[in-house]
Image (cartoon, grey):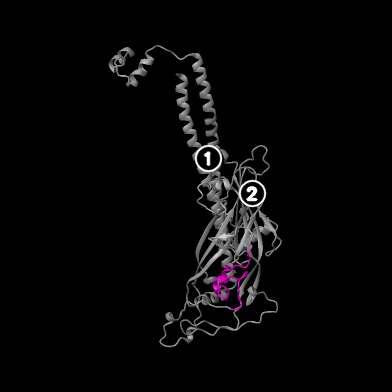
Amino acid sequence: MHFNKINRVMGVNSKNPSNHFSLSLNYFNSHRAFTLVEIMVAMLIMVAAIVPVTALMTNNAKETNVSEAYSAMMHQSTRILDTLLERVRYADIISAAKLQGGLASDTATTEATLLNLLDIKDSTNTAAPGTAVFDQELRYDGPGLAAGKTWQYAEPSRQFEPIIYELKIRQMDKTFRYLLNVGIKNPVNAIGEIPDFNTPNDPPGTLPDQKKVGSVSLSGKLMKITLLVGWGTPRPGITRKYQNNYSLVTFKAKLED
Amino acid sequence: MAILITLTVCVFLLVFATTLYQQNREVRIVEFKVKESLRAQFLAKGAAQMALLKIRTLPTEFYDAVRWSKGWVDETKVPLPLDIKKFIPNVVVNIPGFVSNPSAATDGTPHYLDFYVGFHVDNPTPLGNVQLLGKIIASGSDLYYAADMNDPTNDPFKGDCVVKQIRLISQHNNNISDNVEIVAEGSEDSGNTYMMNNSLGHLKDTPFSQYNSVYRTMIDIGYMVVK
């Protein structure tokens, strides 16, 4: 339909000034075209607008990728540490540290690094001795060091850039204090009575808050576990080993014997 | 007119870009906070392990602490009619000479379980993060540890953890199936105040680069305390 006809139908030529739709049609009907200058300026504005938006979207995609990797790091780190705390024997970690990390003895307090978490063997698995605790979770088939890695949560294009896990362990000497249970109490026989006990012979010069206090020192019973996680090739100019890093610290006690 | 149309499109692009940026920022902040809380959580889990080790090492003292915190009753000397439930007094055990440093108004009346947990104040100027729910952490306590992860290449942070409470919640006569509830708290400080986003002031006076996490677990200790 020709614009003149449209204008007539829509009442453009009527006296109603509020009919904007009709006015816009009238504009196209005026046979006026965009000038070359207008088009050039518009293109410049458009380019100036699209370039930063494109950069932002590209950055967003990268950040999303990093976020996914971080989520995978956190997820897998949680699984590893929970497994170490609740399912793995203390002695099995020490055995791996002696084998791989150069730990001198069962009670040594030096720090040992476990690059290969697959060296932690499950000694409770008598049916298949020597089975690695993390066999399925950290299996890695890519090039390079085939241990301590996982790629199962990384996107396909980065499957040969796996998330790397390292374990640092350091045993700590620990002293626990307790109130001496000496001169056992006169028991309470009725509600409201307060138990009584004899005063132990504290050595001269004992500080007030140490009176009646005994202590026991432990060695080789508590370890500090630091899980180091790394992922991604460092960007130019960055001296870190991996682009993204994460670390968790927890403690494990020897409770099994 | 072409410029007008272009500017209109640009406005839509600007709205889109702003939304994208805002969403991206929020996701990063949430992710950061999850990361921080996970660290605090594992510190708290580590503290719970310390509590279990102390119970494992000092089982008799642990049961003493429980009994003294409730008030001692020798059930063999309860007069007739035998109703042991009447003879579990809720008394505060007064231990003369056992005072905190610096001295406090409650001196002389701490009870055993508090001591066992190590929640008494014995250092007026503890290192690291110093408050858990408004209470000073005793850095010298048995069940406290300050973790300082200062390797700059591995996302450094400072943190600490403390056992807040140990409760014997069920007890079998021969100690085979005793259960304890352990409550521990870990706190973490990466020093990154920007990502903690305290612009709303909801963290008030708390150092807003600090994240706390409470871990509560119930564990059967029967196998540990029977030798």
Q: Is residue B60 above or below residue A137?
A: below
Is B114 magenta? The answer is yes
Which residue is labeled 1 in the image? A64
* Residue B43 circle label: none
Can the viewer see residue A252 in this picture?
yes
Left or right side of A125 for A26: left
Q: Is residue A164 above or below residue A4?
A: below
| Disc 1 chain ID | A
Residues drawn in magenta: B96-124
**Of B103 and B56, which appears nearest the observer?**
B103
Residue type highlighted by circle 2: Asn
SS for dot 1: helix
Distance from disc 1 to disc 2, alpha carbons, whole Å, reads: 21 Å
Quadrant, the C terminus of chain A: bottom right
Residue B22 percent coordinates (x, y): 50, 39
Q: Position of residue A63 (x, y in %)?
A: 55, 39
Location of residue A158 (image quadrant): top right
Q: Residue at x 53, y 36 (%)?
A: A61
Asked if marks 1 and 2 touch (Cβ < 8 Å), the reply is no
Magenta stretch: dominant SS?
loop
Foreground residue, B80 or B7?
A: B7
Q: Chain of mark 2?
A: B
Query: At 67% across and 74% down in the image, what residue appears?
Result: A207
- Residue A55 vertical placement versus A245 (above, below): above
* Image spot of residue A77 (x, y percent): 56, 52
Task: Indicate which disc residue B154 carries.
Answer: 2
